Amino acid sequence: MKSFQIPELYKSSIIGGIKEKRRQKDKLKKDFTPTLLDFGTVRFLISRHFGFCYGVENAVEIAYKTIDENPNKRIFLLSEMIHNPDVNADLLSRGVQFIMNTSGDQLIEWESLTSDDVVIVPAFGTTLEIQQKLSDIGINAYQYDTTCPFVEKVWNRASAIGQKDYTIVVHGKPSHEETRATFSHAKQNAPTIVVKDMKQTVELAKYITGEKPQADFYTEFKGQYSENFDIEKDLRRIGVVNQTTMLASDTQAIADYLKNVMREKYHVEGLDITSYFADTRDTLCYATNDNQSATYGLLEKDADLVIVAGGYNSSNTSHLVELCEQKLPTYFISSADKILSENLISHFDLHSKSEKVTENFLPNKNTTTIMLTCGASCPDAVVEAILLRLLSFFPDTKNVDEVVTQL
């Protein structure tokens, strides 16, 4: 796989060393067991896969290279390049400006841009409508395009099934930049609808089977279907693709559910189902698959708590949190600064969508075991800082370099 030039501030000799040792021992990535760092009074179980993925490293390299190569130009990002506060803060400190926020709300008006400006497309990609806006201004949207190739793979899959007269069902978060981009590209080739979860999928199925009146569809799914969507004819043949960072098990469950709905409605078996349901393979990116598989492997072990690091608006990270909190006390933090003391931690609650402070998050026992992982947009340096911060609360521990060397 290609090697990227990543700024030193995002790297970690400790975490990088752990990853390299695992790569050497498991080149085919078949072993999802975590790495054990035993410091005596505290033990860390480090997930097999985590941190910057191919798409993120590609985006980071392009963004910083663009800044270096355009010292006298105004540089803009359509929105956050990736969902990590450290990376986005550093880009802002270097003079980069965001045109929109992650919800698509305008921060800088299009009219203020000129053909001399540089605009970077984030890793999530962008819509065809925004590409046209940039073109009208005289800006080439493809010159500084950091769109992840695995996102483009989904667009290609959607195009392929759309050209075969299937309606495209996108499993994703409707407001997420990637899903908005995928929706835009998909609807150029076929009628398209977004479902955010199984609950919405079940309701969509009721329109397929006729259990709910067709007129209700346009209110219930407002903003989630393409223009001129015809509820009567556009749900006769469907295929499922997804936002690349969704839970694999959720996407599979949604596809299986809709496939079964079509099978029962049209009374077909075997390969005949392809007349009504497209045979699409999974469109999660490799990193999402690896990170989720590694998290399952991590959770097969015993521990006292889990720390998950990443941006609070990171979809792939939030799904790792969802997996972990099913088994253990889980603390979702953006950086080591959120560990306020050995007794207090400020962490993000996915359910209330807000930060809260928890007391006594570290157990009072002779040996504490902590699981540690992060999302695909989190720098290794952040994970190292969290590891060292936690380690500082435990006396008489072994030397870090010694423990890593012995792996």
Image: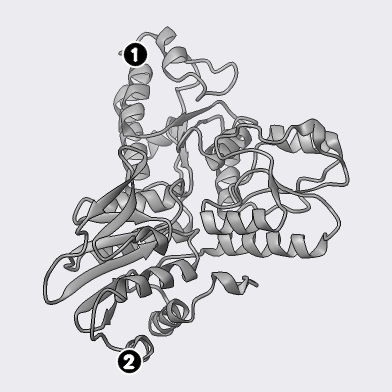
Q: Which residue is mark 2?
A: 406
Classify residue 129 by image quadrant. top right
Point out the frontmost of discs 2 and 1.
2
Q: Residue 339, percent across and down? A: 34, 61
Q: Which mark sits nearer the N-terminus, 2 or 1?
A: 1
State the SS at label 2: loop
Who is closer to the viewer here, 299 or 368?
368
Categorize mark 1 by other alpha carbons within 10 Å: few (<14), some (14-19), many (20+).
Answer: few
Who's the residue at 40% across and 64% down the image?
A: 336
Quarter of the image where the N terminus is located: bottom right
Who's the residue at 31% across and 41% down the image?
A: 253
Judge left or right: residue 310 versus residue 5. left
Figure check: 110 above or below 76: above
Mark number for residue 210? 1
State the SS at label 1: loop
Q: Are marks 2 and 1 in contact (CB under 8 Å)?
A: no
- Residue type, numbered disc 2: Gln
| Residue most extreme to the left | 365
Q: Residue 260, percent across and down? A: 30, 33
